């Protein structure tokens, strides 16, 4: 597996993330349906609200792509937006070329374009992201644009995004034309616990990470959601921080390993980098012990970030740890597993936390079900291998 360094974290959740990757969740989908419906109404105006990092920009970019299939669309960043930039950005994105640089003529060019489009095709769409951060003069111009009409129809469909106070902004006298259009408003909701887990793991896998369930187990996902309140922006930041801390811990902590000996002589060693290891006599086992005492699938090691659990798989002769027969046990550092003439010494075992102890005990009831799935999977693999020989 690639290292969980800042490069992978940045590729999954930071500045190098794939801008085209959208992990949709319920509120995201509801917002898109809301915008499509609002833009299809006669008043053609909508407000999308939510705190910083709520995913508003992601939603409107997807809506802009969808709307551009049958109408001209301009998507403008509202932070410190001035009237001049609003008009020039609109004309540029609408594909309107102008020779004059005078404000009055630029405004006339916008008016001519949107009214002509409304009469012959579909009314253009103007989306202003972070409209509540625009200058007061830009908002007055936006109010003027909202009043443009073509034969009794509004000549410009409008979407504004901002924080929760965006609706209150339209109550100002300078926003009267916008308010007359009675815009509908939708407030985004944060991700649920399950959506958070899907979001984190999907973005990591898309960035090239493997075993996302180990990097982001359920308890880590829940903690990151708690810290970010479930909003995508802060969640991305927390995910990068978590991956960086994981890298630091992994580099400082030695990898657990198993040393296999026979009659006191070292046979082989295994670094425990995977989540599960089957110990057995068959060649399909992960740790092969060629000993008649050992069953084909004798025992299983379950490797956690802060614990290693040994489970006997209903073997014929049982499994012994430190001279004690055990059906299952949490291994400690330097424990010795005895299997016939072989000994398996466990080294670099991480310290067990109380929280992990509780989770392990709760998961023990699922062991046999996992074993049946494992046996079925390995049988399928064996059949496939034989067919190709």
Image (cartoon, helix red, strand yellow):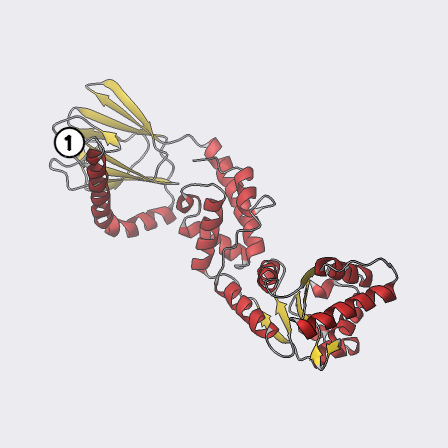
Instruction: Give the secondary structure at mark 1.
Output: loop
296 left or right of 238? left
Residue 287 lies, in percent from the top left, at 25, 30
Judge whether residue 222 can be spotted in this image. Answer: no
The front one of 198 and 214 is: 198
For the point 42% across and 58% down, which residue is it? 194
The residue most toward the top is 265
334 left or right of 64? left
Residue 211 lies, in percent from the top left, at 40, 42
The residue most toward the front is 120
Mark 1 packing: few (<14 Cα in 10 Å), some, or many (20+)? many
For the point 39% across and 41% down, which residue is it? 305
For the point 86% across and 64% down, which residue is it? 103
Residue underneath mark 1:
294
Residue 170 lies, in percent from the top left, at 72, 75
- Measured along the vertical axis of the image, is residue 267 above or below residue 321? above
Q: In the picture, residue 70 is in which quadrant?
A: bottom right
The front one of 177 and 351 is: 177
- Measured along the vertical axis of the image, is residue 59 above or below residue 157? above
């Amino acid at each position: 597996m690639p290292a969980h360094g800042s490069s992978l974290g940045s590729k999954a959740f930071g500045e190098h993330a794939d801008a085209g990757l959208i992990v949709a969740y319920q509120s995201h989908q509801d917002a898109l349906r809301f915008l499509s419906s609002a833009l299809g109404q006669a008043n053609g105006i909508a407000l999308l609200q939510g705190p910083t990092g709520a995913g508003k920009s992601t939603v409107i970019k997807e809506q802009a792509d969808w709307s551009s299939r049958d109408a001209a669309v301009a998507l403008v960043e509202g932070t410190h937006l001035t009237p001049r930039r609003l008009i020039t950005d609109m004309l540029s994105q609408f594909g309107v070329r102008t020779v004059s640089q005078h404000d009055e003529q630029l405004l006339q060019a916008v008016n001519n374009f949107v009214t002509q489009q409304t009469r012959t095709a579909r009314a253009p769409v103007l989306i202003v992201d972070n409209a509540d951060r625009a200058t007061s003069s830009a908002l007055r111009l936006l109010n003027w644009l909202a009043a443009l009409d073509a034969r009794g129809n509004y000549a410009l469909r409008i979407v504004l995004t901002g924080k929760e106070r965006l609706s209150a902004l339209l109550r100002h006298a300078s926003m009267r034309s916008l308010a007359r259009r009675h815009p509908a408003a939708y407030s985004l909701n944060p991700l649920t616990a399950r959506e958070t887990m899907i979001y984190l793991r999907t973005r990591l896998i898309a960035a090239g990470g493997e075993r996302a369930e180990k990097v982001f187990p359920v308890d880590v996902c829940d903690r990151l959601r708690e810290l970010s309140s479930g909003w995508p922006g802060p969640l991305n930041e927390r995910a990068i921080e978590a991956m960086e801390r994981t890298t630091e811990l992994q580099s400082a902590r030695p990898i657990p390993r198993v040393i296999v000996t026979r009659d006191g002589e070292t046979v082989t060693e295994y670094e425990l980098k995977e989540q599960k290891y089957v110990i057995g006599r068959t060649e399909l086992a992960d740790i092969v012990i060629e000993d008649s005492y050992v069953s084909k699938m004798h025992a299983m090691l379950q490797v956690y970030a802060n614990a290693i659990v040994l489970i006997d798989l209903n073997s014929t002769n049982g499994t012994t740890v430190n001279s004690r027969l055990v059906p299952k046990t949490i291994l400690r550092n330097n424990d010795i597993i005895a299997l016939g003439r072989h000994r398996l010494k466990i080294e670099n075992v991480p310290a067990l936390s109380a929280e992990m102890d509780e989770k392990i005990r709760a998961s023990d009831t699922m062991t046999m079900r996992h074993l049946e799935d494992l046996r079925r999977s390995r049988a399928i693999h064996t059949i496939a291998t034989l067919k190709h020989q």
